[in-house]
Amino acid sequence: MKYGHFDDKNREYVIENPKTPYPWINYLGNEDFFSLTSNTGGGYTFYKDAKFRRLTRYRYNNVPVDDGGKYFYIKDGNTVWSPGWKPVKTALDSYECRHGMSYTKFKSSKNGIQSEITQFIPLGFWGEIQKVSIKNTSSEIKKIKLFSFIEWCLWNADDDMKNFQRNFSTGEVEVEDAVIYHKTEFKERRNHYAFYSVNQEINGFDTDRESFVGLYNGFDNPDVVNDGKPKNTIAHGWSPIASHYIEMELQPGESRDYVFMLGYVEVDENDKWESKSVINKQPAKQMIEKYNNVEKVDAALEELRLYWDNLLGKISIDSGDEKLDRMVNIWNQYQCMVTFNMSRSASFFESGIGRGMGFRDSNQDLIGFVHQIPERARERIVDIASTQFEDGSCYHQYQPLTKKGNAAIGGDFNDDPLWLILSTSEYIKETGDFTLLDEMVPFDNDESRAKSHFEHLKASFYHVVNNLGPHQLPLIGRADWNDCLNLNCFSTNPNDSFQTTGNKKDGQAESLMIAGLFVTYGKEYIKLCQRIGNEKEAHEAQIHVDQMIKAVKTHGWDGDWYLRAYDYYGNKVGSNENEEGKIFIESQGWCSMAEIGKEEGMVENALDAVKEHLDCEYGIVLNSPAFSKYYIEYGEISTYPAGYKENGGIFCHNNPWIMIGETMIGRGDEAYDYYTKIAPSFLEDISELHKVEPYVYCQMIAGKEAIKPGEAKNSWLSGTASWNFYAITQYILGVKPDYDGLIINPCIPKKWDGFKMKRAFRGATYNIEVSNPDHVSKGIKELRVNGKLISGFIIPLLEKGKAYDVKVIMG
Ligand code: BGC
Ligand code: NOJ
């Protein structure tokens, strides 16, 4: 069953039924200032950091789901309704929610009144705009009362939900004209405030939640709206809100437009006050002025549209399959921007108060984003590397507001350092900008400890070399990519967090996944050494990579697939000898991508084993059989019921590793089959089961051993977005930036006749047309650029500013 449809022309998903199986959300804002918005008007807004600078409040895991948002109430006689259906939930005559590229539109109607709301954040602006239009489509004169509503968060979203003994006494607001200012804590250490305005005169307002809603009511039934008149309250403590009240009389056919703005202002320490206790409102007024009419708002919306035209124009395909095209051309790229911005911090599954920017997550998110805005990718790489330590180890995350690393969600994840080589090499391949390697980058955010970025990569590489275990395989530390395979953390106390619990200090557990990662990015590190003329280091590094390959072949092969790990006691994990968890996906993916033992048939064997033991109708599960009991020496992984999350769930992030592995041995049918199993647009028809948005990837789909296979959770913020974009564009469609040119080496399903791709690369545009007359999966018979034959798979760098016709014949 579907709840809407794709509108590819407008790059929108159109939700036609507000009762989606879960809130289906969108993100507004592309830099610094962001909002989350659901298909019923739920969500919240923050500046840079969802924990430390939250503007509006949100209630997590609430009953009913998705409570709190940017709400409007329309009172038309005795009927009260909301344009987003919620919170009032009056049955609407029509409803439509269009989630588009950084904007959301609601169009709904009731009893001859039509409302249209467009929410977005103009580029470079610290404010959300809500353009509201109310139209009388009936043949009678209508007297309408419109109430807006938001609830302020007292800035620190974590404290806001906990520290009531203080927070119920700190709230402060000011109201001037049609603007409600939120200034809690402004008089002490905060040099910032927020405001909610509307561009027309109002007939009243409210700023005290209890007065507006009523202590025993919900958002669906506020006292003030029921009474049809505001109380003009000024909040003192408790819970400050902002609600405007507007009366209008509409002739048949007449409509009114309003521009609401939810803005954030920072003022100079010396310029905080207009007069005693009255905040300096000048900056807010300038912001309001900037978009004080519909024409200005529409121009900003158009600018946003052009911005996305440009970003999405850099890679686009025509494959003949609309489901694939809309993923690659629109939604996957859009999601890559969102994961780049949010890491794993703020979604409807990540509270925004738990996690900041993950070290490994942000490095990986970058590979699906770097072609869009390389300058921002470069800045991000430097921010991430700045949190690293001299020995290569890293904080697992940093807060976006401070950019300083912290240990709030643990540390000692021994895969972390290597992802920096991935992001750096992908950035250089896309841009050719080797100067990044020379940039001075601090360790542990301490400028006095800065060294070149190349030294950071070296530290990453040697962090593995210096931390090898009894089989000369990488020590796993607290865990590797799989946060839940906690092989050195023996916890019997249910009050311990698996993420932060102290490791067994003498932990000798080893990871085959890190081994594969090390070989893959070790090879990349060697190439970078050669590029900068450091042959000695390249040679040295090659020795370590070769030793690792040998160690994997000797100690990491189980006969039919790669082992997953050795545990604390030196026992095998992910072996046929084990009763449960006999085979894991991560080491199959990484050792295949590293092509370890390819000549001996290991890669092919391992991928066959994945197909046999891990593949199912909805994707590839993480491990099999899933654990049915708690294994203390395995940690969190065995805490999950079988088939969910890291215990036998389809953890989508790692599926593309297998797709890429398949392309390494030329199996395009298998690679693409795996792709279509988890790509959301291919799952639209089973939305009822799938539950989450059909336009973005989710972290996890319940696996074959789950109670409800195919049901997904944790949409939006997952490394799946960047990895699947990377897998489909660079390995399956096979157009891959490299240091000296653009590689063209598709690995597609045999039945395809070909495809087209437009690819911007290093200032030139390549119009690539691939044809597959012999119906092969891999191999190129002929490659021509502007008619000229090229030998091999690489188009060398060509003159900038021009477009090139690339004709590829497979065979
Ligand atoms: C989850 C992981 C997650 C980790 C850190 C675990 O409970 O299963 O997917 O990365 O927590 O938040
Ligand atoms: C989610 C985390 O964000 C990511 O860093 C981790 O690799 C996966 N979970 C797997 O545990």
Image (tube, rainbow, N blue to C red):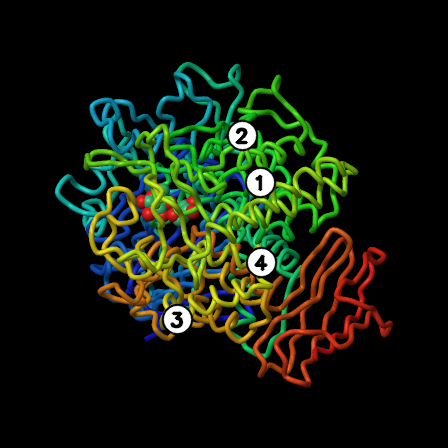
Front residue of 486/606: it is: 606
Q: Nearer the viewer, mark 4 or mark 2?
A: 4
Along the polypeptide, which appears first: circle 4 or circle 2?
Answer: 2
Give residue 388's mark: 2
Give residue 420's mark: 1
**Vertical side of 416 occupied by 138: above or below:** below
Residue drawn at 40 percent across, 44 percent down: 346
**Vertical side of 79 occupied by 770: above or below:** below
Instruction: Give the image location of residue 318, x and y in percent.
Output: 63, 74
Q: How far apart are the two marked residues, 3 and 2, measured between alpha carbons?
A: 40 Å
Residue drawn at 26 percent across, 26 percent down: 167
Give residue 612's mark: 3
Instruction: Give the image location of residue 450, x and y in percent.
Output: 63, 23
Along the polypeptide, which appears first: circle 4 or circle 3?
Answer: 4
Res 710 quadrant in image: bottom left
Along the polypeptide, which appears first: circle 3 or circle 2?
Answer: 2
Question: Label 2 amino acid?
Answer: Gln
